[in-house]
C-alpha cells in the first residue's frame, strides 16, 4: 500500500483498481497522514483557512433521503433570513476578520435569480475584498453565469456519489447524477472556483463507489472538495442506518490531499460531530479549511441536515476563538484571508494529461 501512496503523491492519479485496493485496505495511515501534511505544507504552510458560514434558508424543494431539511419533513421549523439579516452576519464576520463568506441554503424557490443577484451585489459592494461562495444546489447554467457576473467567486455543489445506481438510491427519481455532474462542469466553464464532495459511509456505498468518486474528482479537477461522514437524521428514510466511519473519512482526506495538492479541503462540522477532536484530526490528515458558523444563533438548530450537529449555540466570536485555540494546540494557525487555491499547478498538468490520455473513453470521460 505504501507503493500506491507514493505513486499517488508522485503522479496525482491512480487507476480504478488501485483506488479500490488502497481504500479497502486503509493501510499505512500514519505514513499517509505524514505525506499529506508535508504536501499541504508545501502549498499552505501551517495555515488553516476559515470560511464564515451563513445558513440563510432551510426551505428546500428536494426530498433527498438523507437530509434533515428535505421537503417532506413536516417537523422542520422553516426560516429564511432577510437580506438585512444576512448583511448583518457579514458585518459581524468582517469585524471578526473573515474574508470569505459562504451562503448555504436549501433549494428555495423564494430566492429567485433576481433576489440572489441583488444579494450578491449588496455583499460584494459592502465587502469588496471578500470572496463569496454560494452553496445553493443545482441551478441552470444561465443562472450560474448571472451569479458569477454579479460577483460570486466560488460555488460548492457536492456530487454525493459518482456511481449512478448509488445516486438513485440516495435521491428521488427527479434528481440525477448526470444533471449534478453537468452543473459542476458548467460552473467550471463559467469561471467559478468550484467545489464538489461526497458523504463517507452513506447507505449503499461501496469501495467501488469511493474509487469512482476519486476518478470523477481527478477528471473534474475542482478547487475544493468537501467530505464528511454520513450522519443519519431521525426524520429521514435513513434514520436507522449506521453512521459513516470517521477513520475512513480521515483516510480519504489524506488521499485527496495527495491527489490534488493545492485543494481547499475542509475539516467538516460532520467530522467534528462524530468525533470530539474530529476537526483537529482532519487537519492532521491533510485538511486545511474550517467553517465557523456566522448564522444567527436563533436559527442554527433549525438548519439540521443531520442529528446532533455541533456549534449550534455558540456566538460567532466564541466559535472562532474556540477553533483558533484548537488549531494552535496542534501546531496550526487559523487565518481569515481569502486563501485562494495556489495557482502553480503546472507541475501537475503533464502527469495528469498522460493519465487521462490512457484512461478516457470515446466520449472523453475518464473510465468509471
Image (spheres, grey):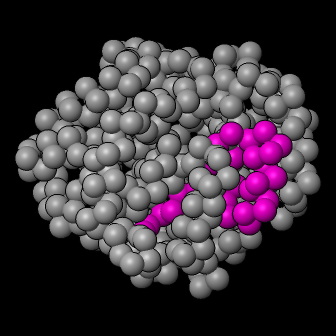
Q: Is residue 87 visible?
A: no
Nearest the eye: 300 or 287: 287
Nearest the eye: 60 or 147: 147
Q: Is residue 160 above or below residue 176?
A: above
Is residue 165 left or right of 298 when viewed as pictured?
A: left
Q: Give how far across and how far down residue 208 sits, in percent.
A: 27, 70
- Write the residue at 52% across / 74% down: 177
Q: Give how far across and how far down residue 276 sits, in percent.
A: 38, 36
Q: Give how far across and how far down residue 183 sits, in percent.
A: 62, 64
Quadrant that contains the C terminus: bottom left
Image mark count:
0
- Write the residue at 41% across / 23% down: 44
Q: Is residue 39 above or below residue 365?
A: above
Is residue 83 left or right of 232 when viewed as pictured?
A: right
- Write the residue at 76% across / 54% down: 145
The magenta segment: 134-162
- Write the residue at 78% across / 39% down: 151
Q: Is residue 271 above or below residue 59?
A: above
Reply yes or no: does residue 148 show up in magenta.
yes
Amino acid at each position: 500500500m505504501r507503493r500506491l501512496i507514493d505513486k499517488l503523491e508522485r503522479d496525482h492519479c491512480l487507476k480504478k483498481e488501485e483506488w479500490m485496493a488502497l481504500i479497502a485496505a486503509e493501510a499505512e495511515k500514519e505514513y499517509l497522514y505524514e505525506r499529506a501534511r508535508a504536501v499541504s505544507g508545501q502549498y499552505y504552510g501551517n495555515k488553516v483557512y476559515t470560511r464564515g458560514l451563513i445558513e440563510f434558508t432551510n426551505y428546500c424543494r428536494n426530498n433527498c433521503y438523507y437530509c434533515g431539511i428535505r421537503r417532506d419533513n413536516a417537523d422542520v421549523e422553516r426560516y429564511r433570513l432577510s437580506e438585512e439579516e444576512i448583511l448583518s452576519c457579514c458585518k459581524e464576520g468582517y469585524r471578526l476578520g473573515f474574508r470569505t463568506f459562504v451562503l448555504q441554503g436549501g433549494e428555495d424557490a423564494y430566492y429567485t435569480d433576481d433576489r440572489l443577484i441583488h444579494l450578491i451585489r449588496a455583499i460584494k459592494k459592502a465587502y469588496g475584498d471578500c470572496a463569496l461562495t454560494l452553496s445553493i444546489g443545482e441551478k441552470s447554467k444561465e443562472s450560474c453565469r448571472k451569479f458569477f457576473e454579479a460577483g460570486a467567486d466560488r460555488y460548492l455543489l457536492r456530487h454525493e456519489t459518482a456511481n449512478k445506481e448509488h445516486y438513485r438510491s440516495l435521491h428521488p427519481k427527479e434528481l440525477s447524477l448526470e444533471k449534478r455532474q453537468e452543473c459542476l462542469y458548467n460552473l467550471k466553464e463559467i469561471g467559478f472556483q468550484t467545489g464538489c464532495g461526497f458523504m463517507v459511509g452513506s447507505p449503499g456505498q461501496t469501495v467501488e463507489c469511493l474509487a469512482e468518486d476519486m476518478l470523477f474528482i481527478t477528471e473534474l479537477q475542482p478547487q475544493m472538495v468537501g467530505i464528511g461522514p454520513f450522519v443519519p437524521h431521525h426524520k429521514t428514510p435513513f434514520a436507522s442506518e449506521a453512521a459513516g466511519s470517521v477513520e475512513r473519512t480521515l483516510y480519504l482526506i489524506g488521499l485527496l490531499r495527495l491527489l490534488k495538492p493545492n485543494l481547499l479541503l475542509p475539516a467538516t462540522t460532520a467530522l467534528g460531530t462524530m468525533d470530539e477532536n474530529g476537526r483537529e484530526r482532519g487537519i492532521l490528515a491533510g485538511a486545511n479549511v474550517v467553517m465557523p458558523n456566522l448564522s444567527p444563533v436563533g436559527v442554527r438548530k433549525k438548519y439540521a441536515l443531520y442529528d446532533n450537529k455541533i456549534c449550534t449555540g455558540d456566538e460567532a466570536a466564541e466559535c472562532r476563538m474556540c477553533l483558533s485555540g484548537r488549531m494552535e494546540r496542534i501546531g496550526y494557525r487559523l487565518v481569515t484571508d481569502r486563501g485562494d487555491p495556489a495557482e502553480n499547478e503546472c507541475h501537475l498538468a503533464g502527469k495528469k494529461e498522460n493519465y487521462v490520455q490512457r484512461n478516457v473513453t470515446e466520449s472523453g470521460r475518464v473510465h468509471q
